[in-house]
Image (cartoon, helix red, strand yellow):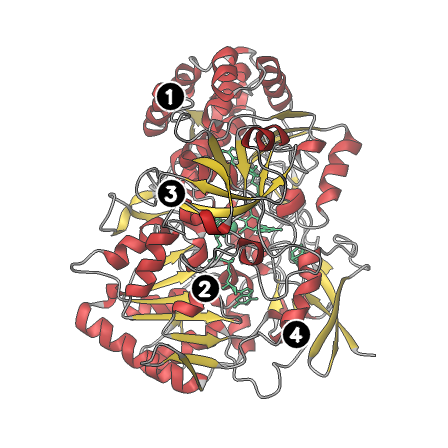
Amino acid sequence: MGTTTTSICRFCMNLCPVEVETENGAVLSISGDRTNPLYRGYTCVKGRTQGARYAHPERLLRSLKRMPDGGFAPISTDEAIGEIADRLRGIAEEYGPRAVALFGGTYMAMDSPVNLTMVDAFMRAVGSAMTFTTSTLDQPGKPLAKGFHGMWMAPGFAFQDPDVALLVGNNPYISHQGRNGPPADFFRGLANRGAALVVVDPRRTETARRATIHLQPRPGEDASIIAGLIRVVIEDGLHDAEFVTENVTGFDALREAVAPFTPDHVARRADVPAADLVAAARLVGGSRRGYAAAGTGPNMSGKGTLVEYLLLCLDTLCGHWMRAGERVRNPVCLAHESLQLDRAQALPPFAAFGYGEQLRVRGLTMTAAGLPSGALADEILLPGDGRVRALLSVGANPANCVPDQLKMTEALRSLDLLVQVDFQMSPTARLADYVIATTLPFEMPGTNLMADFLPLYANGVGLAVPFAQYTEAVVEPPAGSDLVEQWRLLFGLARRMGLQLDLFPGLGEAMPIPGAAPVALDMTRDPEVDELFALVHSGSRIPLEEVRRHPKGAVFADPPVHVKPKEPGWEGRLDVGNAAMMADLRDELAAPADAGREEFPFRLISRRMMHVMNSPTVALPGGRPPYNPAFLHPADLAGLEVAPGDIVEITSARGAILAVAEEDDTVRPGTVSVSHAFGDLPGIDRDVRSVGSNTGRLIADDVVFERYSGQPRMSNIPVRIVRTEPGESSSESH
Ligand SMILES: Nc1nc2c(c(=O)[nH]1)N[C@H]1C(S)=C(S)[C@@H](COP(=O)(O)OP(=O)(O)OC[C@H]3O[C@@H](n4cnc5c(=O)[nH]c(N)nc54)[C@H](O)[C@@H]3O)O[C@H]1N2
Ligand SMILES: Nc1nc2c(c(=O)[nH]1)N[C@H]1C(S)=C(S)[C@@H](COP(=O)(O)OP(=O)(O)OC[C@H]3O[C@@H](n4cnc5c(=O)[nH]c(N)nc54)[C@H](O)[C@@H]3O)O[C@H]1N2
Ligand code: SF4
Ligand SMILES: [Mo]
């Protein structure tokens, strides 16, 4: 019998409270905490099986250094930190600090709440603005669109029993990118209240199956579809005229810009029934207590900012924002109390791109979503002043996840210094000069702080009730291991480089807390984790000490938070007629709906699978294939003369990959639905049945990309598909 401790699963943003059974430092089992009022014992298969990572034979227990013969040799983590610090200092001195870049991924944000502010402080101390993250490869349209539209300073209705929800290319049933807790609860709640669900997705997803109306369009047509919805809402007079008069500007420009998007036009373009589009618009516009949200699909299809902007316009026209006096059901707990949205007034538009660091390619700049990661490979490869020569990869797997894998892996190989922080020998680790072995979440204390920030990021994600939890570390790192926390690595590097670190409270300078100044760390000693937790959570609505008194977490409803009235004299307005966005919408009309069908008859669309979190780990759940199938409609399989389980070659204008075909009648005919982050480095992953396929190899980062965020088109990729065998492929670019 082992010991059971309550903790938090930090494998995805659902942050489930769990019971972890351990024995002699090994994690025996992970199960949901049935006593939790919100999650009620919910966990998913990938969370439950990730316990196997802790004592896995393939786990990295010590750091590695690349030797002159190309192989790796073990090195003590402390020694590695010293050597890396010397090389970073040398590179910064010789080429300027811009030559030092950092790429932060999923597990920079997830594994410790200290990481984000530490990364921010570290790069500021280095003097380099070259911090890239997955934000610009995910849904950068969200923060960018807020810049064009402005922001309502009170929440939407996502967590207040909405009467209608519109989900565009978002599959919370699988991705948990929705309301935290058991995904089914949200949909059951809608059904029990008789609320409507409208889903726009080229695949009849697990979410779409619960929809009142499912529009199953061609991918990449979301801007036209939402413009069509807006047109019907305005035409039918369903908009909230009083809210618009009081808080909105640009109404006439929007009405004019959406005029050509008649139901018939949109129906032809997107290949959806016009009557369904009109019915969907009436559902969405027919209720004040509704909300609209997009997921990764439309953001990845090349026009993310426009799509997200039009969704904000739709919510604004329909008055889908909370008003003065209403109670906010899900106030923040562990985030600074000033970050709570609680004011019924409009923050006017602000600059969301075109400032700060200028990148050397495609006219890209700093954005509200961060520096465009779609330009990282070019910033490494392009000769000249400012070229990136050293890259710290923190909680990320850029070799598999940054699109244009052919270019990205070439870039990673060409660096003077690549440092990969990881717990396993990921493809990026195998390209690195140093691999720093890191702790896993149950070996560290943690909180569910990130959940508080989700509603600030987007409508419809985050906690529906103010639930907060703190966890101690529940296991020691394996005996004889030499691991370091990601934040402690950065602290160690700074100290060895002779840099002073100044930490902002919360998540760092990018998520500023009004009036908060950075705190100078004492660089002469190792910081205690508790003092950093106190700093990160300082000023929280519920003090961290109070949360720590409830080891299983608790709901902190009191004191209640009510939406305050508009400040006297406040003149801010939301802009639904931004000139650049209206011009982008006009471009949509001109763009051919379905170009290039002859050479590339299929469109590859993005998706998530329940049993993996992006890159597969060494602890994949048993009984699941170790590859990511290419899901095709049965009619397409028949047309291609491909049987389920056959190997197909998928070719785009950029490259070709092999994949295992699978039959799936939920996929729209003419599309192929494949998840990302699988496969290995180009040239060595022909055995797709054991490693899967890397869709990033089909993507060019500089041909079709979102104009503000630089996000390459990562879904709706034109491809052709033929049956093949691993041995007989026609292409050289595997
Ligand atoms: N073609 C295509 N590309 C995509 C996407 C797509 O849909 N299509 N999606 C994009 C999106 S939305 C994202 S967010 C990115 C993700 O891109 P990344 O963040 O770069 O990738 P992940 O697979 O999430 O991160 C995995 C890395 O973290 C390590 N890891 C796993 N668990 C832990 C842990 O607990 N602690 C630590 N320290 N490390 C851990 C893994 O070994 C791996 O090396 O990919 C993007 N890339
Ligand atoms: N189980 C699991 N959960 C995860 C992850 C994982 O890998 N596995 N990854 C995590 C990460 S990093 C993220 S960012 C979130 C993402 O969360 P979601 O955005 O919910 O991700 P998906 O489940 O891929 O849903 C995207 C949907 O978009 C659809 N789609 C593709 N192209 C288009 C298009 O052009 N238009 C429209 N309308 N739809 C389109 C796809 O069919 C798919 O159903 O999930 C997170 N959660
Ligand atoms: S949904 Fe799964 S992976 Fe995500 S936090 Fe819960 S158990 Fe962990
Ligand atoms: Mo993501």
Image mark for residue 472 = 4
Q: In the image, is the residue at mark 2 within 8 Å of ligand 1 by its beta carbon?
A: yes
Q: In the image, is the residue at mark 3 within 8 Å of ligand 1 by its beta carbon?
A: no
Nearer the observer: mark 3 or 4; the answer is 3
Tag 1 near tag 3, CB within 8 Å: no
Spatial CA span between label 2 and label 4 = 31 Å
Q: Around disc 2, counting alpha carbons within 10 Å, would you say few (fewer than 14), some (14 to 19), or many (20 or more)?
A: some
Q: Earlier in the sequence, mark 2 or mark 4?
A: 2
One can see residue 179 in this view: yes
Q: Earlier in the sequence, mark 3 or mark 4?
A: 4
Image mark for residue 592 = 1
Name the residue rendered at 38%, 19% in the picture. 589
**SS label for mark 1:** loop
Q: Around disc 3, counting alpha carbons within 10 Å, would you say few (fewer than 14), some (14 to 19), or many (20 or more)?
A: many
**Image side of residue 7 versus residue 578, left or right:** right
Indicate the quadrant of ligand 2 in the picture.
top right
Q: Amino acid at mark 3?
A: Pro
Q: Amino acid at mark 2?
A: Pro
* Position above or below: 602 against 285: below
Q: Amino acid at mark 4?
A: Glu
